[in-house]
Image (spheres, rainbow, N blue to C red):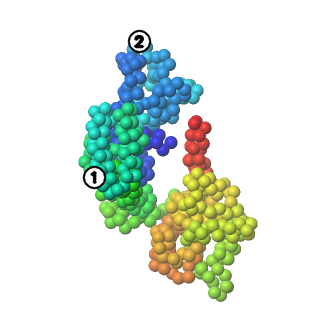
Amino acid sequence: EIDRFRHQATSALSTRKDVIIVASVSCIYNLGLPSSYMEKSIHLELEKPITRGDLIRQLAKIQFNRTNSIVKRGEFRVRGDVFEILAAGEKNAFQITLNQQKIEKIFVINPLTRKVLQDLKEIIIFPPKHFVSNQPAIESAIKEINKELKERISFFKGKGLYLEAERLERRTRFDMEMLRSIGYCHGIENYSRHLTGKASGEPPETLLSYLSLGDNKHNFLTIIDESHIAVPQIHGMFQGDKARKEVLIKYGWRLPSALDNRPLSFREFEKRIGQTIFTSATPGDWELNKSSRVAEQINRPTGLVDPPIIIRPVFDKEKQISQVDDLFEEIKLICKKNQRAIVNTLTKRMAEDLHAFFKRKGFKFRYIHSEIKTLERAEILTDFRKGKFNVLIGVNLLREGLDFPEVTLVAILDSDREGFLRNERSLMQSMGRAARNIDGRVILYADEMTGSIKRAVAEVERRRKIQLAYNKKNHIVPKSIEKDIEQLIDLKEITKEESLWE
C-alpha cells in the first residue's frame, strides 16, 4: 500500500503541477532517476495507431508482468484486443480496447468485477518500478558491477575472508544475471550508482527530485510538521543508513557502491526544499534561528484553553503516600466518570509494572511502547477512544501524536528527572494531550522544580492567558473537539484489504 502511494505521488508530479504530497522522512531516500521514469512511460489516447503486439512489448519492456487471472498492481492481461492494465499507483485498472490497430476505447474499471467506472480519452502508464533503465545502460552497469566485484573479491581473499568473498560473489552474480535477463533484481537500488552513471558520493535522486522536474525547481512549498522531531530525524538518517550499510559491506552482503544508495544528508536536503514552513507546538532552536519570521497560532477556534497544571511530590512525606498511591485515587475518579487518562512513565518496565498493579485493582488499563507492533498499537489506541479501557500507560506517548478529545487527565510520573523524556519540549508535548477536552488537566509528579518544568509551566500559563483573553473578547464558550474514531484504524483496514486480495 505504501508503494502504491509512492507511485501515485511520482506519477502525479510527473503529469501535473497542482499536487499536494504528504510524505514521511523517507522522502529523502533514493528513488531512481525521474528522467528514466518519465521516458519509460506509455502515452495512450483514442485513435492512436498501435498493434496488439506492440502494446504487449511496450508493457513488458517497462517491467509489467502478464497474467491470465485477475490483474494486480504491475500486471496486465490480454484477451483478444482487450487489455486490462493495473498501474502501480492505482486501485482500479485501465481497460484498453483496440480495433483495426487503433485504440477504440479507454475505460477505468474495477479489476475484480470489471464494472466500468469512467470513460477516458487518454492515459499515461508509468513503470511499476522506480528503478528502470534501458538495455545499454544495464549492460554498462553490469560491466562496472563486475569490475567492482572482482576488486572486492581480491580484497577479501587477500585478508583470508573466503566466506565473505564467496557470499558476495554468489549474490552479486545472481543479481547481474537477473539484470541481464529481465532488467531488474531484488535490491536493484543498491546498484543505483552504476545504473544511473553517478559518481561516488554524488547525492541520490529522491521524491524531492520529482518536485523539481522541468522548470519547477524550488517552485514548491515544503511544510515540515512536528519539526522539533522531524528535523533531528533528517539529520540522523544519513549516518544511521551509512552505519548499517558498512556492516553489510564488511561481511560481504553488498558491494561498497551500495553506500551510494542512501538518503540525502541534511545539507543536501536543505538545498532541495526551497520555501519552507516549520510547524510545531514546541519548535527547536534550529528552526527558530533559521526562520525569517515566526508566527504563533495560539488562539483555538473552539476556545479550548491549555490545561491547568498541578504539581505534586513523587513522595509526600506528610501524607506518607507515593505518586502511584496518589495516581490510584485520581484513576478511581476517572473510571467512575468513564473518562480517559494518559499516564507517562520513564521506562518500559515501569509501564508494565504499573499496568499489572492497576489490573490487580480491577481497572481497565493498557500500556504501549516501542516493542508493540504497529497494527497492535493502532488497535490499542482505537480501543482507548472507544472506551474499552480507561487508562493508557506509555513511555514516550508524545511521539504517538495522540489527539484524543476524551482524555481529561495526563499524569507525568517522575517529571523532575531531567533528560530527553522530561525536557521542556517533551513535557509540553505530553501536557498538550489534555488540551482537547474542556475538563482536561495535567498532574506533574516532581520533588523539585527543574528548569524544564519551570519553563514548560510558564509557557503553558502564557498561552492560557492569551486564549482566555481571546475568549472573553469574542464571547467564546470553550467546547471539546470532536474527532472521528475510525481514523485510527485505517492502517489495519488496509492490511485486511491486502490480505483478502491476496
Q: Residue at x 44, y 59 (%)?
A: 226
Q: Quadrant of residue 62?
A: top left
Query: Mark 2: which amino acid?
Result: Gln
- Residue 482 placement: quadrant: bottom right
Q: Quadrant of the C terminus?
A: top right
Instruction: Using the rendered image of the protein, determine whether residue 334 is visible from the camera's viewpoint.
Output: yes
Residue 135, relative to residue 380: is it above or below?
A: above
- Can residue 274 be seen from the camera position used here? no
Name the residue: 56% across, 53% down: 374
User: In the drawing, what numbered circle is on residue 100?
Assistant: 2
| Front residue (pair 289, 482) | 289
- Relative to 335, is 104 on the left or the right? left
User: Upstream in the sequence, badge 2 or badge 1?
Assistant: 2
154, 447: nearer the viewer: 154
- Between circles 2 and 1, the one closer to the viewer is 1
Q: Residue at x 63, y 77 (%)?
A: 323
The tag on residue 156 is none
Q: Residue at x 62, y 63 (%)?
A: 367
Position above or below: 285 against 205: below
Q: How many marks?
A: 2
Task: Name the side, left or right, on which 53 lies relative to 454.
Answer: left
Mark carried by residue 201? 1
Question: Residue 173, how many percent across, how many down?
Answer: 37, 41
- Say if 21 sits above or below 337 in the image: above
Task: Please tell me in which quadrant of the rendered image residue 231 appears.
Answer: bottom left
Residue 460 lies, with reference to residue 369, above or below; the image says: below
Please state the horizontal and vertical placement of residue 424, each as a whole percent of the image.
46, 72
CA–CA distance in space, label 2 to label 1: 52 Å
Residue type for callout 1: Gly
Determine whether the residue tagged by mark 1 lies in a helix, strand or loop: loop
Side of 466 where 361 appears, left or right? right
